[in-house]
Each structure stands twice: as C-alpha cells, then as structure tokens.
Image (spheres, coloured by chain):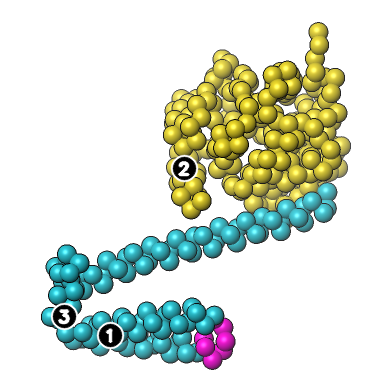
Chain colours: A cyan, B yellow
C-alpha cells in the first residue's frame, strides 16, 4: 500500500510537470500526449487489484504481474537510451559540420 | 628510372591532422618538403599548444583550424575537402607525430598510378619494423576485427599512411570523427568495391610516439562505436 501511495505521488508530480510544459508551450503535443498516456496507464496499473496483475503475469509467462511491469520498463529504458544516443550522434555530426565550415572559410 | 611520384608531385596533396604536436609538426613538414612535397594541408584540430601558429608562421603549408577538437577523422575529412578544393589529384594521409617516413609516399604513389588502384594502404607488417609487443598484439586483434567486421583481410590496420585518388577521397567522405575513421575507411573500401593494395612502410616507434598511441581500452571503445553505428545503420 505504501509503495502504491509513493508511486502515485511521484506520478502526480510528473503530471504537474507535464501540465507546466503544456502551459509554457515548450514541448510538442504528440510527445506530451505520449507521456500523459504512459503515466496514466502506469497509474491505473499501480492500483489494479493484485489478482488481475498476477493473472496478467501468468499470461506473459512470468510469476507476478509486477514483473511484467519491470521487464517492460527495462525494454522502454533501452529504447529511450537508444534514441538518446542517436540524437547525440546527430548533434555531434552537426557540430563537426559547423566547425569544418568555419575552418574552411578561414584557411 | 621512370618515377611518376617525383614527376607529378604538384598534383599530390599531403593531408595532416594536427593535435598538440608542436614538437614534431615542423620537422614532419620539413621532411616532406625535402622529398619534394610542397602541397601540404594541415588541419589543427583545436590543439591547446602553439602548433597552428608555428605552421602558419614558419612554413608554406596550408593551415586550417578547427575551433574545437573534433577528432582525427574529422580533421582528416576537413583536410581532404580543402585539398580537393585546391585541385588535388592524389591525396596522402600522413600523421603529424613523426611516425611515418616521407620516403614511403613515393613507392605508394607509384603503386597507385601504375596499378590503377583507388587506394594504397601502408603496412608496417610487410617490412621489418620493430613493433613493441603490446602494439603488435593490439594490431593483430585489429586485423581480426576488421576481417569480421568488414570482411577485408589486411596485414595491417589503423596505419595512418594512405594514398588515394581525389575521386576515392570524395567517395570515402569520412563520417566517424574520432579514431573509428580508420576502420570506417576499410569498411568503405569493401562497400564501395574500391581497388586497393598494401605497400610496406616504416613506422618509427619512439617513446614519444608510444605515449600517444592507442590503448587497449581505446581499442575496445572503437570496436563498440563501430558495431553500434553499424547496427543503427
């Protein structure tokens, strides 16, 4: 019960941050929608009765429903990390392009 | 004796990436001049020493500067683009740390032209070179990695001395900014189906050059970056 309350508070804080971003118009709508949906689903799952969670777990072939969540979050984390690396690579290439253009103008 | 390289040195551009090598760079440029090569493009890759000023004030080499350090691959690509802009027909990659022997350029150029090759790579293992054991093991590992990664079997990899046509340089278009560029070049030789060969070259291992060489952890890092970039396409 305690963990569910803590998780709910954290999710609510995240929601408030998302709302702040919407108000300040700092993020694209699709991204905000994705995160609202993501954390909304997480909130529902947290408060699902244990029996339903565990039957979900057995569908996926793991013991408990909470394990499905843990595995899913690992997959998601890998995916976001991959996206991040990709974005950084792109940035690095763009920096090099700028540095190169400056060098070529001045020799 | 017919010697293409000597007769056509004006068409040859030597490209040198420079990073914190103020102690060696003037000697390197002078040794190249002594062999008849005057088209030299140096790209200072955000060095923290006075290499840029030294080259600018005491040589006739073309010198450009990366305002921040972007890596050897990036500096080489900039140097090649400048050389091509200047009308180079043949491009030579040459290190700034004094490891390479300018006398090796001539046979490499002759091989390139006579054999109608796209690129000629220097190999330290085709000649009797005193190679420190640690370096030897690392390089042999690199040879195996290159074979598995790019399906190209060479006697030497990550050797900085290369000679190519301007057309090849345009096609290579180095994308890896850091040391991975050496493997990227080999990978592209295979992908672009370039005609290549290896020529024996001398590598001078000094205490100074060894202190600047690749470490094992660096090599692992290079392999990791290459594999991950290949997976990502």
Q: Nearer the viewer, mark 1 or mark 2?
A: 1
Q: Is residue A26 magenta?
A: yes
Q: Give above or below for B110 relative to B182.
A: above
Residue B60 appears left or right of B136: right
Is the residue at mark 1 from the same chain as the one at mark 2? no
Q: Identify the secondary structure beneath mark 3.
A: helix
Which residue range is magenta in the image?
A: A21-27
Q: Name the image quarter holding residue B115.
A: top right
Where is residue B26? Give x, y as percent: 77, 34
How many badges with numbers are in the image? 3
Of all chains, the one bearing label 2 is B
Is the residue at mark 2 from the same chain as the one at mark 3? no
Where is residue B84? Give x, y as percent: 79, 40
- Give yes or no for contact between labels 1 and 2 (Cβ–Cβ under 8 Å): no
How far apart are the alpha carbons under marks 3 and 1?
A: 12 Å
Q: Name the image quarter holding residue A53.
A: bottom left
Q: Residue B223 carries which label?
A: 2
Q: Which of marks 2 and 3 is in front?
A: 3
Q: Which residue is drawn at 36% across and 82% down?
A: A39
Q: Mark 3 points at which residue?
A: A52
How far apart are the alpha carbons under marks 2 and 3?
A: 46 Å
Q: Of label 3 and label 1, which has the lower sequence position?
A: 1
Q: Give above or below for B206 relative to B64.
A: above
Is the residue at mark 3 from the same chain as the one at mark 1? yes
Q: Does the magenta stretch include residue B52?
A: no
Q: Name the image quarter holding residue B59.
A: top right
Judge by depth and name the residue closer to the eye, B7 or B189: B189
Q: Identify the secondary structure beneath mark 1.
A: helix
Q: Which mark is residue A44?
A: 1
Q: Which residue is drawn at 58% across and 16% down?
A: B127
């Amino acid at each position: 019960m305690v963990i569910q309350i803590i998780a709910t508070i954290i999710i609510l804080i995240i929601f408030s941050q998302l709302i702040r971003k919407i108000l300040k118009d700092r993020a694209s709508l699709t991204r905000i929608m994705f995160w609202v949906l993501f954390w909304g689903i997480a909130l529902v799952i947290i408060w699902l009765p244990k029996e339903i969670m565990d039957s979900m777990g057995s569908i996926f072939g793991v013991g408990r429903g909470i394990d499905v969540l843990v595995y899913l979050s690992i997959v998601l984390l890998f995916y976001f990390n991959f996206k991040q690396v990709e974005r950084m690579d792109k940035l690095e290439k763009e920096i090099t392009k700028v540095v190169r253009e400056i060098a070529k103008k001045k020799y | 004796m017919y010697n293409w390289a000597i007769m056509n040195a004006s068409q040859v551009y030597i490209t040198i990436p420079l990073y914190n090598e103020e102690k060696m760079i003037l000697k390197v440029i002078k040794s190249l001049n002594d062999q008849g090569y005057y088209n030299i493009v140096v790209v200072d890759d955000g060095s923290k020493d006075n290499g840029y000023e030294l080259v600018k004030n005491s040589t006739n080499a073309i010198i450009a500067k990366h305002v921040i350090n972007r890596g050897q691959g990036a500096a080489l690509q900039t140097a090649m683009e400048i050389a091509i802009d200047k009308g180079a027909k043949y491009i030579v990659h040459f290190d700034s740390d004094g490891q390479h022997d300018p006398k090796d350029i001539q046979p490499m150029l002759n091989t390139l032209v006579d054999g109608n090759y796209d690129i000629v790579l220097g190999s330290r293992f085709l000649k009797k070179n005193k190679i420190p054991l640690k370096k030897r093991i690392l390089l042999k590992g690199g040879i195996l990695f290159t074979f598995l990664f790019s399906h190209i079997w060479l006697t030497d990899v990550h050797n900085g001395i290369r000679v190519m046509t301007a057309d090849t340089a345009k096609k290579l278009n180095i994308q890896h900014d850091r040391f991975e560029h050496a493997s990227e070049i080999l990978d592209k030789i295979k992908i672009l189906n370039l005609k290549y060969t290896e020529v024996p070259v001398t590598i001078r291992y000094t205490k100074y050059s060894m202190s600047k060489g690749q470490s094992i952890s660096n090599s692992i890092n290079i392999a990791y970056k290459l594999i991950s970039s290949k997976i990502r396409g």
